[in-house]
């Protein structure tokens, strides 16, 4: 699965859930780390709830948030 555009309200064309064979749609999910949680819009499966986190997001914005929380 390769996204055609960045996460968070962007196109999700081409992203298909491997378990449900359904297209992913951008929706609000709750991300949490070290007891802190926050809402974020990410591609997710409307069937099973699988959430797709791109490599760019995981190594960029999410990593920065994790490091900021660890520093507190």
Image (spheres, grey):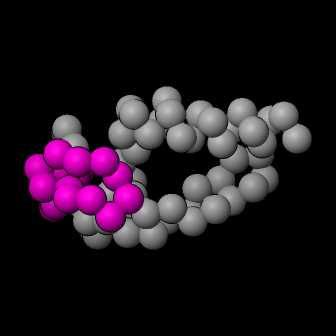
Q: Is residue 44 visible?
A: no
Q: What residue sits 49% from the left and 30% below the top?
A: 59
Quarter assignment of residue 23: bottom left
Q: Which sits in the foreground, 42 or 44?
A: 42
Within the image, what quadrant is residue 4 found in? top left
| Picture coordinates of residue 53, whole percent (x, y) | 40, 44
Q: Main secondary structure of the magenta part?
A: loop
- For the magenta stretch, what is the residue range? 4-23
Q: Is residue 31 left or right of residue 10?
A: right
x 50%, y 34%: residue: 60
Quadrant of the frame with the C terminus: top right
User: Can you say which quadrant of the picture contains the N terminus?
Assistant: top left
Q: Relative to residue 70, is residue 49 drawn left or right?
A: left
Find residue 5 and report its horizontal and vertical position in percent: 23, 48
In the rendered structure, the answer to whether residue 18 lies left or right of residue 64 reads: left
Residue 6 drawn in magenta: yes
Whether residue 6 is situated above or below residue 42 in the rendered picture:
above
Residue 19 screen position, x and y as percent: 23, 51
């Amino acid at each position: 699965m390769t996204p055609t555009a960045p996460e968070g309200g962007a196109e999700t064309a081409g992203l298909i859930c491997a378990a449900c064979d359904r297209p992913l749609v951008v929706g609000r999910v709750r991300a949490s780390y070290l007891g802190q949680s926050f809402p974020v819009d990410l591609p997710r499966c409307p069937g099973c709830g699988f959430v797709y986190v791109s490599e760019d997001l995981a190594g960029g914005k999410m990593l920065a948030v994790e490091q900021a929380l660890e520093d507190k």
